[in-house]
């Protein structure tokens, strides 16, 4: 029998593959952009996002296990899925459009969805809500960083 954590992890993995819809030219554009002097942690960003996504999937698992298969739980799962899709869309959309403004908007949208998700999950499980805190902390940092890069690279706004 397939376990719920396998399904949640599998869906998260499949959605994460969407981040690969970029070209070498997209990456080249991004690498030439100026960065804020304080951006010293860029190499750690993939590790940070991996931790954030693991926490999000674990949170979804806890919520599913509390009330499996109910309409309310399916709606919560849809919100988790929407958050991951928006988050994964950040790089491909920003890089394809070559627009830091698009990245800033997507980042801000993800943060708003994460606030809503956390508030919806909190009555179900405090632990599940707590596992969303890394997203709530990191998302504004990433969004602010993109916004700061937009100011340093107005031609690529």
Image: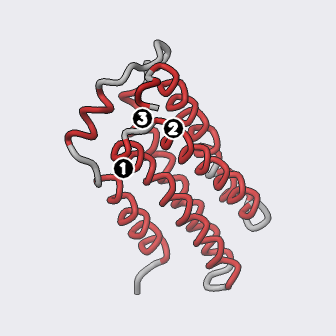
Q: Residue at x 43, y 74 (%)?
A: 7
Residue 124 located left or right of residue 22: right
Which sits in the foreground, 111 or 55? 111
How crowded is the residue under tag 2: few (<14 C-alpha within 10 Å), some, or many (20+)? some
Q: Residue at x 27, y 37 (%)?
A: 27
Q: Is residue 13 above or below residue 150?
A: below
Which residue, as the protein is rendered here, is positioned at the far front? 155
Q: CA distance from mark 2 to mark 3?
A: 19 Å
Q: Label 3: state its secondary structure.
A: helix
Q: Which residue is mark 3?
A: 45
Return the x and y of residue 93 as percentages of the image width and height.
40, 49
Q: Label 2: state its secondary structure.
A: helix
Give the foreground label among 2 and 1.
2
Which sits in the foreground, 79 or 8? 79
Residue 29 located left or right of residue 109: left
Return the x and y of residue 157 as percentages of the image width and height.
47, 32
Q: Which residue is mark 2?
A: 101
């Amino acid at each position: 029998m397939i376990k719920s954590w396998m399904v949640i992890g599998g869906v998260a993995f499949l959605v994460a593959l969407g981040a690969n819809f970029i070209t070498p030219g997209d990456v080249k554009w991004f690498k030439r952009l100026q960065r804020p002097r304080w951006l010293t942690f860029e190499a750690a960003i993939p590790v940070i996002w991996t931790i954030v996504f693991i926490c999000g999937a674990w949170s979804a698992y806890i919520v599913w296990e509390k009330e499996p298969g109910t309409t309310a739980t399916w709606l919560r799962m849809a919100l988790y899925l929407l958050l991951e899709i928006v988050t994964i869309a950040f790089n491909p959309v920003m890089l394809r459009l070559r627009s830091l403004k698009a990245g800033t908007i997507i980042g801000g949208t993800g943060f708003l969805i994460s606030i809503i998700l956390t508030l919806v999950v909190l009555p179900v499980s405090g632990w599940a809500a707590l596992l969303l805190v890394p997203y709530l902390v990191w998302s504004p940092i990433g969004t602010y960083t993109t916004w700061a890069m937009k100011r340093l690279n107005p031609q690529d706004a």
